[in-house]
Image (cartoon, rainbow, N blue to C red):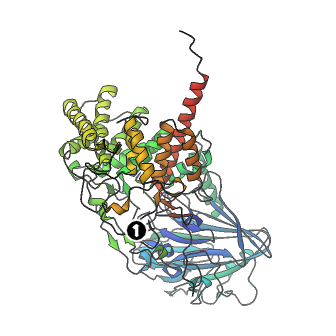
Amino acid sequence: MTAPQPTPLEDYALLSDLSTGPLVSRRGSVDWLCLPRFDSPALFSALLGGPDDGRWKLWAVDGEVVERRYVPRTFILETTWRTPTGTVRVTDFLPPADTQDDLYRRVECLDGEVAVEHDLRIRFDYARSLPWFRRVEDPGGEGSALLCTAGPDGVLITGPMLYATTRPTADDDLTGEVAGGAQGGAGVGNPIAGPAEHGREVNDDVPEGCPDPAGNPAPRLAGRFRLRAGERLDWVLTWFPSWDRAPAPIDPETAQRLTHGFWTDWASQLEVDSPEEHLVARSLLVLRALTNFRTGGIVAAPTTSLPEEFGGSRNWDYRYTWLRDAALTIEVLVSHGFTEGALHWRDWLLRAVAGDPEKLRIMYGLGGERELDEKELDHLSGYADSRPVRIGNGAAGQYQADVVGEVMLALAELRDAGVAEDEYSWGLQTSLLEFCVRNVDRKDHGIWEMRGEPHFFTHGRVMMWAAFNEGLRAVAEHGLDGDVATWTRHRDALRVEILDRGFSTELGSFTQTYGGTEVDASLLQLPHTGFLAADDPRMLGTVARIEQDLVGERGLVHRYRTAADLDGLDGHEYAFLICSFWLVEQYAGSGRLAEAEETMAGLCACANDLGLLAEEYDAGSGRLAGNFPQAFSHLALIRAADAIQRARGARGAATERPLDHRP
């Protein structure tokens, strides 16, 4: 028997309402959905197991996908299916969640006659809770609807009526794909005796097997519906707290128009000048999509436990707001003119860190929550049998020396863009620098959240230098008040220390840790802080060492050598895309423009057909890996593209500069 194969990550599309981020496979299966927030328990978890862990698959019977795309500069997904008898388009989207959370699935027959089929399995709380279904009146007055509840969660399904069944689909056969992928539907019959009804006529029927008004458990809901050219059917899944009255979704046409208007209005502000414009624009949209509109918190990714090595145990929950990730995101948003979003995040930061800065965390929940206890979900088999599946993140309690520097650099970018500090925001930054003073001699776990013993990581020490440097620059250039003497003393002492202990004259390179011999891709970020120039001989030596030790197939860069056993973890990992984009940035900044362009082209080819990137890329299998889509990867793509454009501009200016004929 063939082992089940997971749907490749590159086959997934992201939807977003700025509150949650479901993933939809190329074959029409919503395999991951957390409601009402990115970090809420999932009601569709097939991504981390199988179909029976929750999904909503909608496909054309006997059809093949011939095209999928986002409506330009939106997260409205269009998937076009062709069957032997006709063509149908499925449109999936979530309107911005200003009042409620709705997932719309619209089906339109473009020509001929097509049957579409549903397989809906709602499993609240990461597939630990089977819901109770009952038939109710549609709150919008459109006939009947299905009400689904379990504990605190409620879901309303509106549209042509689905029915309960226990018949398996082809996906449930172990020879099929685990999540999405296979066509499915082999055992699903038409809920109405005889031929399926056309168009909206099915709305008026209550098929055999439909949950009754008294309610009953329904492990699986199904339905097959036939459409002719020009006919359209719509289904909506609406989440609400189970103790509240079920809200009525707005009509699909209006919802789609509002969703389109929201995204295109936001995207109209994009300032992009790059040959990679489509990927840069999509990356900026992804960063916006991963930002919670209510709180301003930015999740690192909308998923948990997608593995850094297929079949491995390096599987982490990224549905939280890392100060570092959010700070780097704000830098690129500000550089492209999005200061309003940056201010939203600054306000989030002020709330999250409020109180004693000594208790600063490296990550928080979307609302600023501090308790992110890590747990393992043993009942889920994991993506590609990668266990354990984790929720929460145990690294939240780590001390990482680079974090304050990342935040100070981001807030300096905002300040330099003309956004004035208020007493509260600058007071926060001075408190963060006091935190640095108190921890200046403390070892840490590094940017990569090592779970081994703490060390003095060179990157972290440089970021601490950057924190003091940005504080001093704020005083000198923006007239703010601060403890100049103390900040200067620590900044200057750190510089001497870093050059003495973090640089190996024997290797001609900066090292991962003080006194070590390993290199780390995070060292590629030293020029970004202003600590030294990209073409400084010490930096060039470091790059040469990274090329030797960390660059693998297709020019992709690994974070560090896992064989050195510094991280305290079992197993290995694939190349990290952010590190590879950092190398592009370094090449562009040090006069190696042709290599930067060549490497950039290879990295852009790692994106899927919709322009989405995961955390990692396995060059051996040609597969995306790690949590998906990943803010780190997308913000690094933007920075790399910007660096190439600056280098091109500098080269062009040098070429056009008039010759100096003076003797």
Q: Write down the residue under mark 1.
A: 315
Q: Is residue 323 above or below residue 535?
A: below
User: Residue 169 location in percent, x, y?
Assistant: 61, 85
In the image shown, does 130 or 327 lie closer to the viewer?
327
Question: In the current view of this chain or complex, which residue is farthest to the front?
Answer: 506
Label 1: few (<14), some or many (≥20) within 10 Å? many
In the image shown, does 344 or 415 lie closer to the viewer?
415
Residue drawn 53% across the image and 85% down it: 213
Tell me the quarter of the picture where residue 77 sits: bottom right
User: Residue 404 location in percent, x, y?
Assistant: 30, 45
User: Residue 544 location in percent, x, y?
Assistant: 43, 45
Q: Is residue 336 visible?
A: no
Q: Is residue 511 visible?
A: yes
Q: Is residue 655 above or below residue 67?
A: above
Question: In the current view of this chain or complex, which residue is farthest to the top?
Answer: 663
In what quadrant of the picture does the N terminus appear?
bottom right
Q: Is residue 458 above or below residue 536?
A: below
Q: Is residue 226 above or below residue 600?
A: below
* Kind of residue indicated by mark 1: Asn
Q: Seen in the image, is 84 located left or right of residue 72?
A: right
Secondary element at image label 1: loop
Q: Seen in the image, is 565 located left or right of residue 291?
A: left
Number of numbered labels in the structure image: 1
User: Residue 526 location in percent, x, y?
Assistant: 37, 41
Q: Seen in the image, is 613 located left or right of residue 253?
A: left
In the image shown, does 398 or 288 lie closer to the viewer?
398
In the image shown, does 290 or 463 lie closer to the viewer?
463
